[in-house]
Image (cartoon, grey):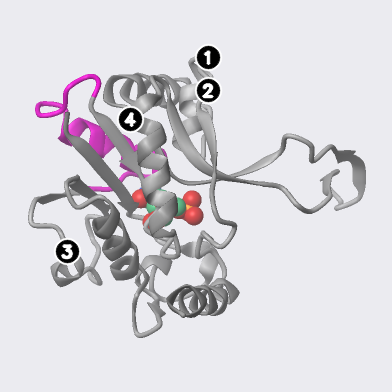
């Protein structure tokens, strides 16, 4: 079947406090999104790309897209709305058991080997899988005043990264369910979990960081340089 690659890049990046959304900030001389798309295309050259962009976006340049076959979809209010828009846009062409791989535009450091490993797992898993990293720090649950209420056990606690991949029909129904229920989610796995399924955690590199704060760009430059050497 076809492999669909959905890249949500329709965020406005308000947490960053920058004038440009974070996916367009310069990283090692090129916009974050250009790095992300290049890495995805190197690992998944056969995929059909669906790129979610804000309808009023004025920064995007089609020259950054290394795919011949790709489409642009308007983003929604939340990340999950953007992904749903993409699923709707491909509905007529996607088969129920086609693989859909979703990767944040804001994760430009994802490694080639992690992308390949995840795809291998996905082709054999009926539910779905995501890159993830075991938590290393001690985790504290706080009250509203930043006072510790208790310490969470970090045993079996993971950071959910992207890509995350699922079969088309399952992801569609899961997202439809959570969007209708109004429960906010921040990744695709959460939607699939809400239907009672348990996606597979695939150990990924901890340097697959998400550009969220200005400091992250400095870190990402170091990661790219280290990976290239
Ligand atoms: O804000 P957050 O870090 O969760 O964003 C993750 C990814 O989702 C980013 O690549 C961002 O551009 C994208 N996004 C989107 N549509 C939204 C919000 C975020 O495509 N409404």
Which callout, 2 or 4, points to the residue nearer the camera?
4
Distance CA(mark 1)–CA(mark 2): 5 Å
Q: Is residue 57 above or below residue 122?
A: below
* 10 Å crowding of disc 3: few (<14), some (14-19), many (20+): some
Whether residue 166 is visible to the viewer of this picture, yes or no, is: no
Q: Is residue 86 magenta?
A: yes
Question: Where in the figure is residue 217, as x and y percent of width and height?
Answer: 51, 75
In the image, is 7 to the left or to the right of 198? left
Which of marks 4 and 2 precedes in the sequence?
4
User: What is the CA distance from the residue labelled 4 to the residue labelled 1?
Assistant: 21 Å
Percent x, y for residue 161? 52, 47
Magenta span covers which residues?
74-97
The residue that mark 3 highlights is 66
Residue 194 in view of the camera: yes
Q: Which element is circle 2 on?
A: helix
Residue under the point 17% across and 28% down: 1
Residue 221 is labelled as none
Q: What residue is rendered at 34% in x and 63% in y?
A: 36
Height in image: 158 above or below 205? above
Determine contact: label 3, label 4, CB under 8 Å: no
Instruction: Decide whether residue 208 is among the magenta residues.
Output: no
Q: Residue furthest top?
A: 196
Number of residues whose C-alpha sits closer than 10 Å to that of mark 1, classed few (under 14), some (14–19) or many (20 or more): few
**Residue assigned mark 1:** 196
Q: Which residue is mark 4?
A: 123
Residue at disc 4, CB closer than 8 Å to ligand 1: no
Q: Which residue is mark 2?
A: 193
């Amino acid at each position: 079947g076809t492999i669909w690659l959905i890249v949500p890049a329709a965020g406005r990046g308000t947490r960053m406090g920058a004038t440009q959304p974070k996916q367009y900030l310069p990283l090692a001389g090129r916009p974050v999104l250009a790095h992300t798309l290049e890495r995805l295309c190197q690992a998944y050259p056969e995929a059909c790309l669906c790129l979610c962009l804000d309808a009023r976006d004025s920064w995007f340049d089609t020259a950054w897209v290394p795919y011949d076959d790709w489409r642009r979809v308007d983003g929604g209010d939340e990340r999950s709305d953007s992904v749903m828009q993409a699923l709707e846009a491909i509905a007529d062409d996607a088969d129920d058991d086609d693989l859909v791989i979703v990767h944040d535009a804001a994760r430009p450091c994802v490694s080639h080997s992690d992308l390949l490993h995840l795809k291998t797992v996905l082709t054999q898993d009926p539910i779905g899988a995501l890159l993830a990293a075991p938590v290393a720090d001690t985790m504290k649950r706080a009250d509203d005043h930043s006072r510790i209420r208790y310490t969470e056990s970090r045993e079996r606690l993971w950071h959910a990264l992207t890509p995350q991949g699922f079969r088309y029909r399952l992801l569609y129904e899961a997202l439809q369910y959570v969007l209708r229920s109004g429960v906010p989610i921040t990744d695709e796995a959460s939607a699939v979990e809400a239907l009672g399924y348990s996606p597979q955690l695939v150990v990924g590199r901890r340097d697959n960081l998400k550009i969220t704060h200005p400091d992250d760009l400095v870190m990402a430059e170091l990661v790219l340089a280290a990976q290239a050497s």
